[in-house]
Amino acid sequence: MESISDQQRAVASQLTKAYRRVLRNRELERAKTLTQKVYDCCFVNCLKASKNMEWSHRLFYRKLYLGLVPHLLACVDRVISYAHSAKARAKKRLRAAKVDDLEGLNKECAELGFLFRSSTRLHKALDPSSELHKQQGIEQLKILVVETEALVKRVPPGSGLDVQFNLDIAIKGIVTEKKASKPESKPELLVDNANCLDDWVDVDDVDDVEDYVVVE
């Protein structure tokens, strides 16, 4: 039987490790939520678009663009998806609804229509290639974060949106002002009374200096 050389063992070990990495990545990918997958897609799109942008004078915005905008886009995309599918279901119920249910269903459809239009507008403004990112306007980006937060709050609880984590990251990183650190208080300087006596009394003006000295 032909023996295996050390080099062959090393190659086999590397291939085994690579294969295990692939399996592990596949398992992690399958375990991801829909929102996480949407975020991954948004990040890749931002990364591609960033290569065609000028960052020489605005490196801070580049950090926001690659680090936080994908989280914001993931929130908006999930609202779009929710509003689109929920409105389609509501329309089906509307066609078969009784007269007493029409008013409530019409209101629901109107609200879902508002969510869809608003989220679509926000997606257009936040798109990786949008004019906002070309101008690198941080204040305008903050406004869009606030609008996204308000929009997410209008989505009914229990809808399975699963974007709060991403939204919190975007708010904390873009909108929340950092608190100024308090200056450290310096310890009081303790000086012997006798040594500082002449700082507050003129010894030439008194007859007996001993009257002013604290005797221990």
Image (cartoon, rainbow, N blue to C red):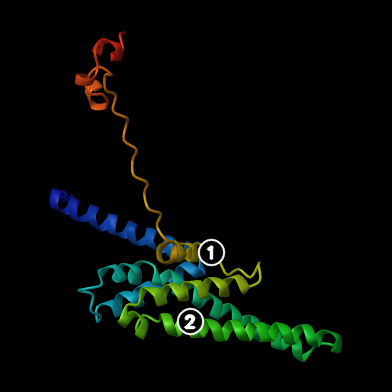
Where 78 sits versus 182, above or below?
below
Q: What element carries label 1?
A: helix
Quadrant of image for the C terminus: top left
Residue 59, percent from left and from top: 25, 69
Give the image quarter of residue 151.
bottom right
Q: Nearer the viewer, residue 60 or 76?
A: 60
Residue 79, percent from left and from top: 55, 76
Which sits earlier in the primary sequence, circle 2 or circle 1?
A: 2
Tell me if residue 44 can be seen: yes
Q: Nearer the viewer, residue 57 or 209?
A: 209
Residue sitting at 37 percent across and 46 percent down?
Answer: 182
Instruction: Say which residue label 1 marks.
Output: 164
Instruction: Say which residue label 2 marks.
Output: 122
Residue sitting at 75 percent across and 88 percent down?
Answer: 94
Q: Which amino acid does label 1 sit on?
A: Gln
Residue sitting at 32 percent across and 31 percent down?
Answer: 187
Give the image quarter of residue 213.
top left
Residues packed near mark 1 inside 10 Å, few (<14), some (14 to 19) or many (20 plus): few
Q: Which of 70 and 60 is in front in this view?
A: 60
In the image, taking residue 100 as reference, residue 114 lies left or right, namely left
In the image, taking residue 49 as reference, residue 121 lies left or right, namely right
Count of marks overlaid on the render = 2
Is the Cβ of the residue at disc 2 closer than 8 Å to that at disc 1?
no
Where 106 sits versus 13, above or below?
below
Q: Residue furthest top?
A: 216
